[in-house]
Amino acid sequence: MVKKSAKPARSATPLPNAIKDSAHEIWLAGLAAFSKAQHEGGKVFEALVQEGLTIQRKTQAAAEEKVSTATQKMNSMASEIGARATGQWDKLESIFEDRVARALKGLGVPTAREVDALAARLAALEKAASPRSARSAAAKKTPARKRPTARKTS
């Protein structure tokens, strides 16, 4: 069986008084903190605003630096990709030109080099033939001399 301890009636009253006193002290401390916050709240608020501005500036500077770095990297990558693409286009163009040249050769179409060589040979032939043509043209323009013919005597 549980036995109840019998306490004198006097000992019961100090505990509620202690709780009441403690609660009153907490109330007074809260009231003092509220009053202090009201008086110094403006100063604290301004200090917090200034600290916020400082943090914002630092964050913004860091963000701008990151954006600048990222922009440089992107530009570098774009240049590299452009160079690769140009190289690939050049390679593709070369393959296309080779195939077209083979197809034209298969059809018997002369290449540009062959046409140039033929033109050079033609020019050389014209140059070689021009002194002969000049002589023959001069000969045609000058009337031929008549030989004296034997006269018939009757």
Image (cartoon, grey):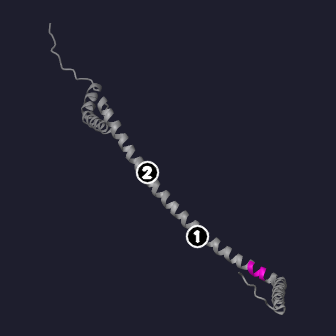
Q: Position of residue 131 (x, y in %)?
A: 25, 34
* Residue at image location 14% in from the left, 9% down from the top: 153
Mark 2 falls on what kind of element? helix
Q: Which mark is residue 145?
A: none
The residue closer to the viewer here, 62 or 141, is 62
Looking at this view, name the residue that lies furthest to the top.
154
For the residue labelled by badge 1, is the local secondary structure a helix, a strand or a loop?
helix
Residue 117 in the image: state x and y as whole percent. 28, 38
Q: Earlier in the sequence, mark 2 or mark 1?
A: 1
Position above or below: 57 against 140: below
- Residue 47 in magenta stretch: yes
Judging depth in this view, the residue of 34 and 104 nearest the camera is 34
Quadrant in which the N terminus is drawn = bottom right
Tell me the residue at 40%/47% (across/down). 90
Q: Is residue 153 magenta?
A: no
Residue 139 pos. (x, y %): 26, 27
Local packing at callout 2 (Cα closer than 10 Å; few below 14, some 14-19, many 20+) is: few
Q: Quadrant of residue 26?
A: bottom right
Q: Amino acid at mark 2?
A: Thr
Q: Residue at x 44, y 55 (%)?
A: 83
Circle 1 sits on which residue? Answer: 65
Residue shown at the point (39%, 44%) measured from the top left: 92
In terms of depth relative to the viewer, which is nearer, 58 or 34? Answer: 34
Query: What label does residue 86 carry, if any?
Result: 2
Above or below: residue 45 compared with residue 127:
below
Name the chief secondary structure element in magenta: helix
The segment highlighted magenta reads: 44-48
Type of residue at label 1? Answer: Glu
Nearer the observer, 151 or 123: 123
Is 54 on the left or on the right of 103, as rendered? right
Q: How many marks?
A: 2
> Is mark 2 in CB contact (under 8 Å) with mark 1?
no
